[in-house]
């Protein structure tokens, strides 16, 4: 299985909350993981980050896809 | 600082790759981070997952926002 | 009408399901259609695909916009 | 393989265009594919669509994920 | 023309920047535009906002669709 | 606070609507604002826009992130 996405973490389901049509799955990421962000160079210049810097990584839950292999 | 997003991890920048207009920032995420996914209940039924199950967590890098606090 | 998006298919509504605040519209795509995916070259290298290959095309329903012309 | 997404089409790669860091993969989708859109009920009311109606289905290419099974 | 999206602003193009495959269009939006955000109630509770509060509205440029009517 | 996103507007909350699991926050953008859209050059060619042109700016509400500073 090969995915055309830079972020592929392994998660463990800790809770499932159901609404009427949508639901929310909570996960724990057990191991150290790698992630990537793509942005414009204009945004990178605004952020003013360098290798070694600590940053907040924010993702809306609707953009997180789960796959059961 | 409060973010209206379920996924707020702390990452360490490991590499910055620049194209002509876009760039890619690679990050390391420590173990035991928490994430969430929102989907339709139809999708949850297809996935057929339960608490304790292991899943693949896939996110396109364009949907990952970095913030420098 | 011109849209700044690579994917513009024609669909026929087959079902509408309403939750309390969100809803889900199911569609049939009657004719052969063209689609496009944009990703990093790193992701393309991982996928290892070539012209003529068959791939799975996955899109979360929240990222599908309907327009009534 | 189970995906937590409502849209899972089968496509055939017809062209790959590379930039410096990003690339674009063009695909052909066979007729009679099924798709879904999730939106607010407010948006549905604005659209004013019913079963049987024809609509335009618009997706930005960055939100299309390819998987090679 | 009816769009199934809560955010439909009118903008004026002020600059177009081209990369090798991607480009960036800068816009000016007039005062008194209306916008909407959809999130989980969990996220709303974290934000702790009420009517009348001032908030930062953040959108990645890849998720902004332009249409020429 | 620095955000890696091209769109950072200031909004005032005018209404909050709650569903069972998701909610919708309506906003007013009081001042003239700047926005940006990133797309493929192919999409730009289709749009056929120039500086000074007026365009519709469409964003699905799920892709709008609110931050309380």
Image: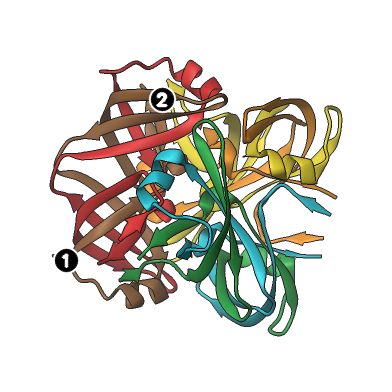
Chain colours: A red, B brown, C cyan, D green, E orange, F yellow
- Where on the picture, by quarter, is residue D2? bottom left
Q: CA distance from mark 2 to mark 1?
A: 35 Å
- Where on the picture, by quarter, is residue B55? bottom left
Front residue of E57 and A66:
A66
- Compared across the picture, whether D37 is left or right of A27 comes to right
- Compared across the picture, whether C38 is left or right of A3 comes to right
Q: Position of residue C41 (x, y in %)?
A: 45, 40
Residue drawn where x is 21% and y is 41% of the image: A33
Q: Which mark is residue B45?
A: none
- Compared across the picture, whether E2 is left or right of F9 comes to right
- Residue at the disc numbered 1: B53
Front residue of D2 and C62:
D2
Q: Which corner quadrant holds the N terminus of chain D?
A: bottom left
Q: Is residue A43 above or below residue E43?
A: above
Residue drawn where x is 16% and y is 39% of the image: A32
| Circle 1 Cα neighbour tier, 10 Å, few/some/many (<14 / 14–19 / ≥20) | few
Residue drawn where x is 61% and y is 60% of the image: C35
- Where on the picture, by quarter, is residue B15? top left
Q: Which mark is residue B17?
A: 2
Q: Position of residue C8 (x, y in %)?
A: 69, 60
Mark yes or no: residue D61 visible.
yes
The tag earlier along the polypeptide, 2 or 1, is 2
Q: Position of residue D68 (x, y in %)?
A: 38, 61
Mark yes or no: residue C21 visible.
no
Q: Position of residue D39 (x, y in %)?
A: 58, 63
Chain for mark 2? Answer: B
Chain for mark 1? Answer: B
Residue drawn where x is 47% and y is 41% of the image: B62
């Amino acid at each position: 299985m090969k995915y055309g996405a830079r972020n592929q973490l392994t998660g463990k389901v800790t809770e499932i909350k159901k609404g009427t049509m949508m639901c929310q799955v909570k996960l724990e990421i057990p191991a150290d993981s790698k992630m990537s962000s793509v942005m414009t160079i204009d945004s990178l210049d605004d952020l003013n980050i360098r290798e070694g810097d600590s940053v907040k990584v924010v993702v809306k839950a609707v953009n997180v896809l789960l796959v059961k292999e």
